[in-house]
Amino acid sequence: MTFEFLLFTLNMNKIKSIVVVSLGLTLGLASCDSGNMRRTPGHIYAPDMTYSVAYDAYTSNPNFSDSLTSRKPVEGAIARGHLYDHLKEGDTTAYKTYTTSMRFNADELKEGGRLFNIYCGICHGSNLDGQGPLFASGKFASMPANFKDAKYLHMPVGQMYAAIKYGKNMMGSYASQLDVKQRWMVLAYIKKYQSANGGDAFTFGESGKATPVVVDTTKGAVAMADSKDKKDEKKK
Ligand code: HEC
């Protein structure tokens, strides 16, 4: 046996033992925390902080028959400032005074006209005389409102808004087709058209500044309902 050979075998043994030890360590450590991990540490300083006593928001709750921990609003609840958006004929005449503080620029009024022709024109007619193709063809029995007629020329926008939102007799609701801003844009288009045809002065105004797409739906109501809220706030 030469000296070199002895050195080599010595090294081999060293390497072997390093491999065996590290393998053992890896396996040993891994087995501590594999499969069913231990979720419960032995000692917890403040268990009621580690494990919430209250029901977490999305966990099931045995105290309610529907097992929801996050409760739904009471039926009929209306978010503050949204009351006027929920008023309809028969609730109170106040729905007629509903209006908006949104102001539309020329592009938005044009968009209002486009939407009108898509959703309303088929009945109310592209020149707003109630002679849309559906009614003119005789396939629709009920005469749509003729917006040039005196009855509608001075109709409050709140009442017209209610017609879009809830429908009116033979006319269905357009609430699912038009969002709040779109409804007011359509109404602005109608009102502007009416003011050019003997109706009241056009009050929605062209702002020159576009109303943001995400619209604060409370704005219309704010103009009226919140004047009272603001007084209440001052008192506080
Ligand atoms: C399917 C046909 C039809 C479509 C589409 C239609 N309407 Fe009407 N609309 C009617 C009829 C019919 C009436 C008359 C209801 C009545 O007084 O009995 C009416 C009435 C109205 C009134 C008067 C409400 C009142 O209080 O007297 C407004 C305002 C109105 N429509 C707006 C719209 C707008 C805005 C659209 C589009 C978003 C639209 N309508 C789409 C058929 C339609």
Image (cartoon, grey):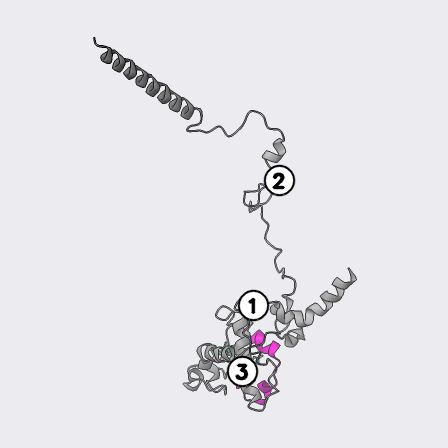
Label 2 secondary element: loop
Q: Residue at x 41, y 26 (%)?
A: 30
Q: Circles 2 and 1: CB distance less than 8 Å?
A: no
Cβ atoms at labels 1 and 3 below 8 Å apart: no
The Cα atoms of the two marked residues, 3 and 2, are separated by 54 Å
SS state under label 1: loop
**Residue 181 x %, y %:** 54, 71
Of the image marks 1 and 3, the number of the one nearer the N terminus: 3
Q: Which mark is residue 190?
A: 3
Question: Of the numbered discs in the image, which one, if any, rests on residue 54?
Answer: 2
Which kind of residue does numbered mark 1 sit on? Val
Q: CA distance from mark 2 to mark 1?
A: 36 Å
Q: Which residue is mark 1?
A: 215
Q: Which residues are magenta?
A: 145-164
The answer to if 166 sits in the magenta stretch is no
Question: Is the residue marked 3 within 8 Å of ligand 1, measured from its CB?
Answer: yes
Q: Residue at x 27, y 13 (%)?
A: 7
Q: CA distance from mark 1 to mark 3?
A: 20 Å
Residue 32 in view here: yes
Name the residue located 48 percent from the left edge and 77 percent from the top edge: 111
Give the camera-side residue of 61 and 104: 104
Mark 3: give few (<14), some (14-19) or many (20+) Cα within 10 Å: many
197 to 177, vertically: above or below: below
Please tell me whether mark 3 sits on a helix, a strand or a loop: helix
Mark 3 or mark 2, earlier in chain: 2
Q: Position of residue 234 (x, y in %)?
A: 76, 63
Direction left: furthest residue:
1
Residue at position x 61%, y 68% in the image: 86
